[in-house]
Image (cartoon, rainbow, N blue to C red):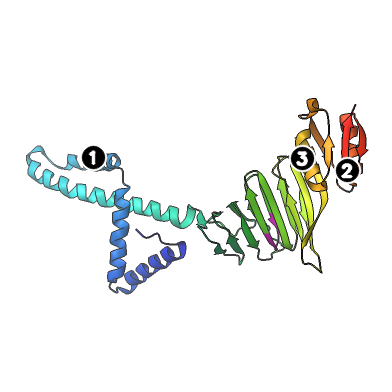
């Protein structure tokens, strides 16, 4: 059976109600849809539940008939069986309809290409291939909340009183009205901001606030947060990246060093026996040299530099 969207179901039911009130004849197309709906629902009915329901109805009616009325009772049983089936069907249809109309979240999935989703508050979401967006029936409420799996670009309708929150896998992004992109690849998470302001929160690290042309990322490491400035060279048009802030909360030293080496194009040597020592540090605002000094202080080590190589030693 072709799945009806929320608005189509609402329109269909309203039209049937119009027919009932005006006493107009239901169209062939509407009749056909009702038959399909009935057939689809009957497949999902539990046979044991149907039998028990029939028996309960019959047991409540049998005391009205004497044993001499066995033929009439048998005929009536057949009639009651049919009535019981109709009652069960109507209850099932009502439950399915109520769940679909008022409870079941709307789920939007992008296949091989992008999919554009227009939300009721005027926000527009562009789902990138393979992504999934879940929107509760209560949306939009005082706080507009959606759930995202995969990557998507959000153009959020502005509202000073109704925050818009995207719950992604392991982190969330809160805005009042802006344009941004969420990227999720394995453990690596990122938020690119194009317009407005956003607050990004992730477990174990402080909330990060982004401005336009800034990016939040965890570099694929838990309890890590960084903000990167993204600017374009006016002459070549190439993007330039600058690490504005970097924080770790209980992160193994080897992970910290990997991030520092990758973002500052340098090499850091340290004693192998301390590679799993947990580091909690905020390297925001310092130069790379100052950050290395801070790291050495935390570890109780000294720093030696030769060319572009830093060595931490006792």
Q: Residue at x 67, y 58 (%)?
A: 181
Q: Residue at x 38, y 67 (%)?
A: 12
Mark 2 or mark 1: name the one nearer the start of the chain: 1
Please determine whether, in this image, residue 194 is positioned above or below residue 173. Answer: below
Q: Nearer the viewer, residue 240 or 188?
A: 240
Mark 1 or mark 3: name the one nearer the start of the chain: 1
Q: Position of residue 212 (x, y in %)?
A: 77, 62
- The answer to whether marks 1 and 3 mark residues whose Cβ atoms lie closer than 8 Å is no
Q: Nearer the viewer, residue 16 or 261?
A: 261
Q: Residue at x 48, y 56 (%)?
A: 102
Cα gap from disc 2 to disc 1, whole angstroms: 85 Å
- Decide if residue 286 is on the left or right side of residue 29: right
Q: Using the image, tell me which numbered label, if any, was put on residue 258.
A: 3
Q: Using the image, tell me which numbered label, if any, was put on residue 179.
A: none
Q: Using the image, tell me which numbered label, if any, was put on residue 308.
A: 2
SS of the residue under disc 1: helix
Is residue 177 on the magenta stretch? yes
- Decide if residue 64 is on the left or right side of residue 119: left
Is residue 43 on the magenta stretch? no
Q: Which residues are magenta?
A: 174-180
Q: Is residue 252 visible?
A: no
Image quadrant for the N terminus? bottom left
Q: Residue at x 77, y 40 (%)?
A: 258
Q: Nearer the viewer, residue 173 or 77?
A: 173
Image quadrant for the C terminus? top right
- Decide if residue 80 is on the left or right side of residue 314: left
Q: Position of residue 113 (x, y in %)?
A: 53, 61
Q: Using the image, tell me which numbered label, if any, was put on residue 55.
A: 1
Within-10-Å neighbours for mark 2: few <14, some 14–19, many 20+ = few
């Amino acid at each position: 059976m072709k799945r009806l969207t929320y608005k189509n179901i609402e329109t269909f039911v309203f039209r049937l109600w119009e027919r009932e009130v005006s006493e107009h004849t239901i169209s062939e197309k509407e009749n056909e849809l009702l038959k399909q709906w009935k057939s689809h629902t009957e497949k999902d009915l539990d046979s044991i539940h149907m039998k028990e329901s029939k028996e309960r109805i019959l047991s409540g009616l049998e005391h009205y008939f004497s044993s001499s009325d066995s033929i009439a009772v048998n005929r009536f049983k057949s009639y009651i069986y049919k009535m019981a089936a109709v009652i069960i069907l109507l209850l099932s249809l009502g439950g399915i309809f109520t769940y679909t109309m008022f409870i079941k979240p709307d789920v939007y999935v992008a296949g091989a290409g992008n999919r554009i989703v227009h939300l009721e508050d005027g926000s527009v979401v562009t789902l990138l291939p393979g992504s999934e967006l879940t929107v509760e029936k209560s949306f939009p409420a005082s706080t507009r909340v959606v759930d995202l799996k995969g990557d998507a670009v959000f153009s959020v309708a502005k509202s000073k009183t109704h925050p818009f929150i995207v719950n992604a896998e392991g982190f969330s992004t809160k805005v009042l009205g802006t344009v941004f992109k969420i990227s999720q690849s394995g453990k690596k998470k990122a938020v690119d901001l194009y317009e407005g302001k956003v607050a990004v929160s992730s477990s174990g690290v402080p909330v990060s606030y982004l401005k336009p042309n800034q990016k939040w990322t965890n570099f694929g490491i838990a309890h890590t947060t960084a903000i990167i400035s993204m600017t374009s060279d006016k002459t070549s048009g190439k993007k330039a990246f600058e690490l504005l802030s970097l924080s770790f909360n209980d992160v193994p030293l080897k992970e910290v060093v990997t991030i520092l080496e990758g973002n500052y194009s340098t090499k850091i040597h340290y004693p192998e026996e301390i590679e799993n020592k947990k580091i909690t540090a905020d390297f925001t605002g310092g130069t790379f040299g100052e950050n290395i000094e801070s790291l050495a202080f935390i570890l109780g080590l000294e720093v030696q530099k030769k060319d572009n190589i830093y060595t931490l030693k006792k």
